[in-house]
Amino acid sequence: MRLFTTTAGLLCYLERYRNGKDVGLVPTMGALHRGHFSLIERARQENNLVIVSIFVNPLQFGPTEDLQRYPRQLEADQQQCERLGVDAIFAPTVVEFYGNHLSSSDMGIQVTQVVPPTSMTSVLCGRSRQGHFQGVATVVTKLLNLVQPERAYFGQKDAQQLAIIRRIVADLNGSVEIVACPIVREASGLALSSRNQYLTPAQRAQAPILFQALQQAQKVFKSGEREGMSLIETVKSELAGVSELQVEYVELVHPKTLTPLEQVEDCGLLAIAARLGTTRLIDNILLYNRQPIVAIDGPAGAGKSTVARRVAQSLGLMHLDTGAMYRAVTWRVMEAGIDLDNESAIAELVSQSQIYLTNEPQAESALTPQDSLPLRYRVWIDGEDVTQVIRSQEVTGNVSAIAAQPAVRRELVKQQQQWGCQGGIVVEGRDIGTHVFPDAELKIFLTASVQERARRRQQDLKDQELPIVSLEQLEQDIQQRDIRDSTRALAPLRKATDAIEVVTDGLSITDVTEHIVNLYRTLQAIPLSLEV
Ligand code: AMP
């Protein structure tokens, strides 16, 4: 592992070692704990090079805040990073990072700063921490410009920071993917934070009240309460149980826009800031007002699409057929007469196209004999019904070339996520649980041994009266495909850490469907577990 304290050193390292590899950046202020580790571990899984920045950024501290006493422990942090397989730490001094322009008294007026929308900085922590998010926006933008990572990792713990950074990247046309990681907590429920070090033992025993209050509100929410006032009151009355706690705010906002909500429509962020003595604590939970999302990922040949369709039928949910979406845009591109390798023209066309699917729950009897196209299953693109034509040989022949184009994928993931807002869908693919719907309530990783998949493939060939390929050859092909799928840059196959693995060797489609349906029903019956 390398340690760089200058931008020159870091840039030189990146020039030398990047070579087209994916870079993941984890920005931190150091004093690393398990919360940070979870970000680093995720970055390690998803990238070839992992850079952790450690920089206590003066621009994001107010004049009366804890800049001087903020914990600094570079040596211990270095050891942890080494253990976690980090490739390089970037830990510049203030002068190295900002030049000589930043003096402690002028609040950065001589430094170019990034100003996020006021609507996002005037709520929650922004009310009391004037200039804080401008400081965060500036440091993060500088780090992103320097490292130019493919992905950058942030904790849901700082939900306002996360929303603002996402917005900045979108508004300034950044190309980095912002990856949100769940809050890591102590067994008591207290969210890990570098500032927890300031708490006395007595305060540490009181601090879990924040999470307990949020859990109480979640219970009330689950019983049907959607009114912001009532949810906020629930939190406040719980917090009142610790008289030493000075509550700064309890607010309900939309997690993306941070607009205050009178009631939870699709999703709400319920957030608290409070002080115990001089220590400021924050915590939050997301409240989803939607039916669950079932995300099914797994290698080729594990039976994902049939299982997804059957699970959707059994549960009365929509099967969001992402394959049909790729087929629809392929048809649209062919219809428009655009060359398949004219990626920019395809990107323009696809970004202006709207796909619409209907796939209401079907009785088994309503299925066509091939069990592939339920009667009410329809696919439209730009107002045209393409349900049948997208199954043509021509579309089948071209769909993988189109699906491999990053712009096409970006647009379709966006459209899939729009469907996800209402929930109640079953989706299958390779990175649905890790990338498209990381918040899915039920994640399944459907797999089968290479031998079993080869056997199934051979049976398919027989059924379709196609030339038979030997099992050895099929096994080799499958192994190679698995390696390709899990190492490719675009939508690599990965099991989400919170996915349930279902090995389908020796199980029928009906067995697998039943198993997933039961998992879903269990999930409905018990309150969602929170990250502990
Ligand atoms: P900080 O060092 O406090 O600036 O945090 C660096 C990153 O770690 C931010 O993206 C935080 O949101 C994230 N982080 C801090 N604490 C936690 C936690 N308990 N769980 C998950 N992420 C966290």
Image (tube, rainbow, N blue to C red):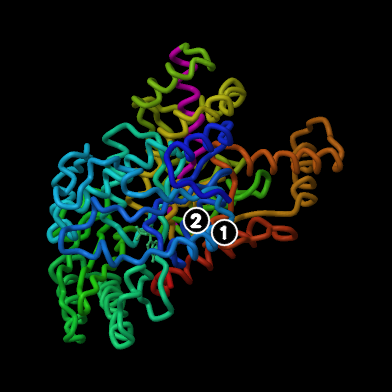
- In the rendered picture of this protein, how many numbered marks are placed on residues? 2
Q: Amino acid at mark 2?
A: Ile
Circle 1 — which element? loop
Q: Amino acid at mark 1?
A: Leu
Q: CA distance from mark 2 to mark 1?
A: 7 Å
Residue for point 54% across, 60% down: 497
Q: 298 or 21: which is nearer to us?
A: 21
Q: Which residue is mark 1?
A: 84
Circle 2 — which element? helix
Displayed quadrant of residue 70: bottom left
- Categorize mark 2 by other alpha carbons within 10 Å: few (<14), some (14-19), many (20+): many
Q: Which residues are magenta?
A: 316-336
Q: Position of residue 441 (x, y in %)?
A: 43, 61
Looking at the picture, does residue 374 appear above or below residue 34?
Answer: above
Which quarter of the rendered image does ligand 1 occupy? bottom left
Left or right, residue 78 beside residue 471? left
Displayed quadrant of residue 108: top left
Q: Earlier in the sequence, mark 2 or mark 1?
A: 2
Q: 282 or 441: which is nearer to us?
A: 282
Q: Is residue 334 magenta?
A: yes
- Categorize mark 1 by other alpha carbons within 10 Å: few (<14), some (14-19), many (20+): some
Residue for point 31% across, 52% down: 162
* Badge 2 vs badge 1, beta-carbon distance below 8 Å: yes
Q: Position of residue 247 (x, y in %)?
A: 16, 74
Left or right, residue 473 beside residue 73? right
Looking at the picture, does residue 182 appear above or below residue 190?
Answer: above
Q: Position of residue 487 (x, y in %)?
A: 63, 41
Q: Which residue is mark 2?
A: 40
Residue for point 29% across, 57% down: 159
Q: Note whether ligand 1 is within 8 Å of mark 2.
A: no
